[in-house]
Image (spheres, coloured by chain):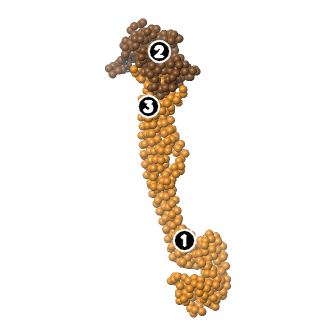
Chain colours: A brown, B orange
Amino acid sequence: MLEFKNISKSFDGPEGKVIALKDVSLSVSPGELLAVRGPSGCGKTTLLLTAGGLLRPDGGQVSLNGQDPYGLNPDERSKLRARMIGFVFQQFHLIPYLTVRQNILAPSLALPVKEVDERAEELISHFGLDSRAGHVPAQLSTGERQRTALARALLNRPKVILADEPTGNLDEANADIIFSYFSQYVADGGCVLLVTHDVRAAAHATRTLQMVEGQIVQYG
Amino acid sequence: MKIWQILVKEILHRWRQFALGLFAVIVAVGSLTGALTSLKVHDLHTQKILTEKEEETNKKMAILEDEMRKATLKLSFNLLILPKQQSIRDLHLKGYPSEYMPEEYVTRLANSGIISVRHFLPSLQQRIKWPEKRRTITLVGTRGEVPNLHKNPRQPLVQPVPPGTIVLGYGLHQSLGLKVGDKVKLLGREFAVHECYEERGSVDDFTAWIHLREAQELLSKEGLINAILALECLCPGVEDLLGNIRKEIEQILPGTQVIEKGTKALARAEARIRVGQEAKAAVERERQHRAEMRSEREFFAAVLVPLVMVACAVWVGLVGFNNVRDRKAEIGIQRAMGFRARQIMFLFLSKSLIMGLLGGALGIFAGLGFGRWLALEGDIEGIAAGELFNPGLFLLALITAPVLTVISGWLPAMVATRQDPAEVLREE
Ligand SMILES: Nc1ncnc2c1ncn2[C@@H]1O[C@H](COP(=O)(O)OP(=O)(O)O)[C@@H](O)[C@H]1O
Ligand SMILES: [Mg+2]
């Protein structure tokens, strides 16, 4: 489903070139939750954004459902993202002036979703947000915010979830809710690429990779 | 979920920022419509002032004309129409005409359509001995006015002397000790004194006036007169006035001659024309003054308004950049969700458009008030706000303002679409 072949990416920092990804190759198949673990600054976020078609690599090939997102024009790349991918971030990135329901519905503006209102209500009740559907993010707890973000990522029934430290701001109980949903999603045939420095993640992953200074160092 | 919901919610969420932008649009549109409105107010004022001035002038002229009429009347006549055979030398030597023409001439003249003469006074005059009082007087038979039928019928200029009455000059009633109502005999006929004139210092002081018919009978000159006084012979602006009237009259009454009387009247008529011209020049000077004021205001508007508009456009642009900066995370996540650049552009430009339309509409009303204030000249109450409202201006503002905001919002919107989503999404 998602494949990296010899991906490299470097940035121009104030003290010369910073290598963020160095010859990274990996693949995530349907039914798989791949956790990439590593210390801060090792290139995890770079890896995730590259996978999501938001950051063009310097070298190597990305394949998403058989398509290279960087071989498409910007509009098609956006469409591919809207159709295939759900993002979850540590910072939630909810739109502050929209209600929970509207945030969850927002992706349907990028690409129409079938029976979108039913789908949204289903996700709202699944994540226990019924009493919160009309609230704006500032009125929510962090756990509710992340559940809202996850529900939003799932609206278009994506084939791939890209999650960047999704539990970084959450307590144990809320982290467990997220992880257990990932497990269920994977069991239903989805695939998740999870990047984190959280050791707990390993317990929910079907496979774990270790990353150091832009390189995959340990295949698990 | 519709995209306009995002638009509206975002505006409400960051309403202070929106209000700042809106304010700039109101200022821009307000200064534009304000400047145009102040010119309109100025024009209305100018019109009012000039109309008042003109009315005042016309009123003054009317009073002047009335006075002239009376003055001309006191001089008795302007032109004298005499039988052709009348020697002018004789006339001046004797002081009265001695040749005769049919009374019917007056009617003919009145019906002829001559327009340069307003009033005709037929008269029969003769120097006679007043046998009963043993003195020489000038006896004048007069019929009062024969109005020119082709002119507006006016009130009679001359009090006609009613039959059976007599009007006496100053020298006569003084020396004879007569007063109004007294009976006096003349050539064997009894007359009641109808009026005693004030002193005039002329031959009039030794003149007696009776009705024309009775004069004709007493002097045995039935159906005859020897002069027609043509009063208010005037048509301003025509050169050689006298020559023209003379020609005209001599054509209608071939057996007559026309001489000028009362040059003083003509001089006054000329003075009247001069006063009229002077009054017109005063109105013209006022008009010029107002035009100068207007061009000053135009200059002010032409320089200041574009400056304000440019400043406001820059301000709207800055507010736009501020908005883009505040929405960095939002744009990033929207891109991650698969929003296309065009949709991001739409969100920002629509906001600019709404700001422009709303600011334009509000700016017009601000401008109307501002314009009235700019053009304040005392009695502004004379001009209603409704009188200033102009659909064309409304349309202009409603088009100008959104064009302005969309242009100003273009660059920030471009920046928003070009923004790298990775930059904000990477933040921890
Ligand atoms: N835009 C950028 N410019 C310069 N350096 C960057 C940029 N983005 C990331 N980096 C660097 O690349 C390395 C990897 O960053 P990142 O992928 O965010 O690490 P992680 O998510 O594992 O903490 C870091 O050293 C970071 O400083
Ligand atoms: Mg990171």
Viewport quadrant of the N terminus of chain B: top right
User: Looking at the image, which is closer to me, B258 or B111?
Assistant: B111
Q: Residue at x 42, y 19 (%)?
A: A90
How far apart, in angstroms, are the residues tagged by discs 1 and 3? 76 Å
Q: Is residue A16 left or right of residue B236?
A: left
Badge 3 vs badge 2, beta-carbon distance below 8 Å = no
Q: Which residue is mark 1?
A: B66
| Disc number for residue A177 | 2
**Could one spot residue A209 in this view of the protein?**
yes
Does A219 sit above or below residue B223? above
Earlier in the chain: of badge 1 and badge 3, it is 1
- x, y percent for residue B239: 54, 70
Q: Chain of mark 3?
A: B
Point out the quarter of the image occupied by ligand 2: top left
Does B427 sit above or below residue A1? below
Secondary structure category for the residue under label 3? helix
Are discs 2 and 1 both within one chain? no
Residue type, mark 2 in image: Ile
